Image (spheres, helix red, strand yellow):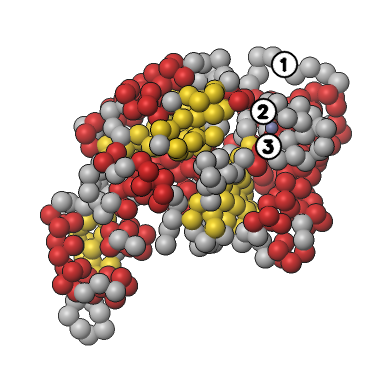
């Protein structure tokens, strides 16, 4: 762990504590801190009066050293947020999108417009932005060159990173949205002390991120976490990926609404968007049996999916996020836990907590921004995010240790 990383995660500390905590000599710590102070990356924040001894000056990360941008690309809009180095939100805009109808180049123009707006709103020069992290639906393959596969959006090997890089004013880092949300949860969220964590994103699409001993589990082509496309009903409903019976074909926003329409035997109003319709469903469930049955069944499918995660990954904690997760999670949690308990092996289930994430709708964008901060910390605070090679950034993954 670099010294800067330690200061970032553990907060203000004296040089003596930093030497003790890192095993570095006091002289080395003194030299590194002097360099970081000179570059304005850390600041001295006050004095700690240590038990009768000489007061020690504390050192902390300078939140205003640089800004980072996080982008959450969803199917109906992109949330673009600008943060300080400590990931305090300074400005945010929402750019409407119409995926999958929108072409990748149009998506890139909209993101570029949003990034320029937040930089302007925050009143900072563009060169103050360390980097831009982007969370997208689909599989982001880091394989020398970087491209995105998202069958539900009709994207096949789209070089999105390259397109974004030419349009945006700072280095870009790209990952799947469930994985960026997972990073935010791991850094700041509900189960931040957990080392073995599953973070599930319930939205229009469904995905997950897994952390094994604090490190993001990526798989051979970085596509691990496609939980939404694991089968829960053999020969079941047709999924947007082309397979049958996927979890997403039951608990993705569109699938929940379709099941509601089928059970209540009436079409959904065409002009209302998914978010409003899902709110309508929650209200209707108070009185309507078909609506209540749809929500109950949704909780059962999520619970079964979670039991599979418990049996496969043995996490300490499963965090539910995404806009559908935020909307339905608190209401469905008891039923989700009950179903998961009935389906999972008893021993691993007795060691897992299932919670709704507390980071709210910002988690994907915030997590995308952590990609940039992660690279900055790993690099000891040198340069902008892009100056570290992408392969290094990928290899470092979400490691916290
Ligand atoms: Zn599928």
Using the rendered image of the protein, determine whether residue 326 is visible from the camera's viewpoint: no
In the displayed structure, would residue 204 be above or below residue 59? above
In the displayed structure, would residue 326 be above or below residue 170? below
Q: Would residue 258 appear left or right of 328 to someone viewing this image?
A: right
The residue pinned by badge 1 equals: 269
Using the rendered image of the protein, determine whether residue 273 is visible from the camera's viewpoint: yes
Circle nearer the N terminus (3, 1): 3
Count residues near mark 2 (Cα–Cα under 10 Å), then give few for <14, some for 14-19, many for 20+: some
Q: CA distance from mark 2 to mark 1?
A: 25 Å
Ligand 1's image quarter is top right
SS of the residue under disc 2: loop
**Comparing marks 3 and 1, which lies closer to the viewer?**
3
SS of the residue under disc 3: helix
The residue pinned by badge 3 equals: 229
Ligand 1 closer than 8 Å to label 3 CB: yes
Give me the residue at 72% from left, 46% from top. Answer: 305
The residue pinned by badge 2 equals: 241
Q: 379 or 333, which lies in front?
A: 379
Residue 276, image x, y percentages:
64, 26
């Amino acid at each position: 762990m670099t010294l800067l990383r330690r200061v970032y995660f553990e907060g203000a500390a004296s040089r003596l504590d930093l030497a003790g905590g890192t095993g570095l000599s006091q002289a080395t710590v003194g030299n590194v801190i002097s360099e970081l102070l000179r570059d304005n990356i850390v600041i001295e924040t006050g004095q700690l009066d240590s038990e009768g001894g000489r007061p020690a000056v504390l050192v902390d990360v300078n939140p205003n050293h640089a800004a980072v941008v996080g982008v959450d690309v969803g199917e109906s809009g992109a949330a673009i947020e600008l943060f300080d180095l400590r990931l305090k939100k300074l400005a945010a805009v929402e750019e409407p999108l119409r995926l999958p109808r929108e072409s990748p180049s149009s998506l890139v123009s909209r993101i570029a417009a949003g990034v320029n707006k937040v930089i302007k709103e925050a009143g900072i020069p563009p060169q103050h932005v360390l980097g831009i992290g982007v969370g997208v639906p689909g599989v982001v393959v880091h394989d020398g060159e970087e491209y995105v596969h998202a069958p539900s959006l009709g994207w096949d090997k789209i070089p999105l990173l390259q397109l974004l890089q030419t349009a945006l004013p700072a280095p870009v880092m790209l990952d799947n949205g469930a994985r960026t949300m997972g990073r935010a949860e791991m850094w700041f969220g509900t189960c931040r002390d957990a080392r073995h964590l599953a973070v599930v994103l319930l939205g229009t699409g469904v995905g997950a991120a897994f952390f094994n001993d604090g490190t993001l589990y990526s798989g051979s082509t970085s596509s691990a976490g496609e939980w939404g496309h694991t089968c829960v009903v053999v020969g079941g409903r047709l999924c947007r990926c082309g397979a049958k019976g996927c979890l997403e074909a039951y608990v993705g926003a569109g699938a929940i609404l379709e099941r509601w329409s089928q059970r209540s035997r009436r079409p959904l109003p065409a002009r209302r968007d998914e978010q409003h319709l899902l709110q309508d469903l929650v209200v209707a469930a108070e009185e309507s049996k078909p609506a209540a049955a749809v929500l109950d069944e949704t909780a059962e499918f999520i619970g079964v999916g979670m039991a599979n995660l418990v049996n496969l990954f043995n996490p300490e904690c499963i965090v539910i996020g995404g806009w559908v997760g935020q909307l339905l999670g608190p209401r469905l949690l008891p039923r989700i836990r009950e179903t998961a308990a009935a389906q999972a092996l008893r021993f691993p289930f007795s060691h897992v907590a299932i919670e709704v994430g507390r980071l709210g709708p910002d988690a994907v964008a915030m997590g995308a921004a952590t990609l940039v901060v992660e690279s900055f910390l790993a690099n000891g605070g040198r340069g902008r995010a892009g100056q570290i090679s992408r392969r290094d950034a990928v290899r470092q993954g979400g490691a916290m240790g």
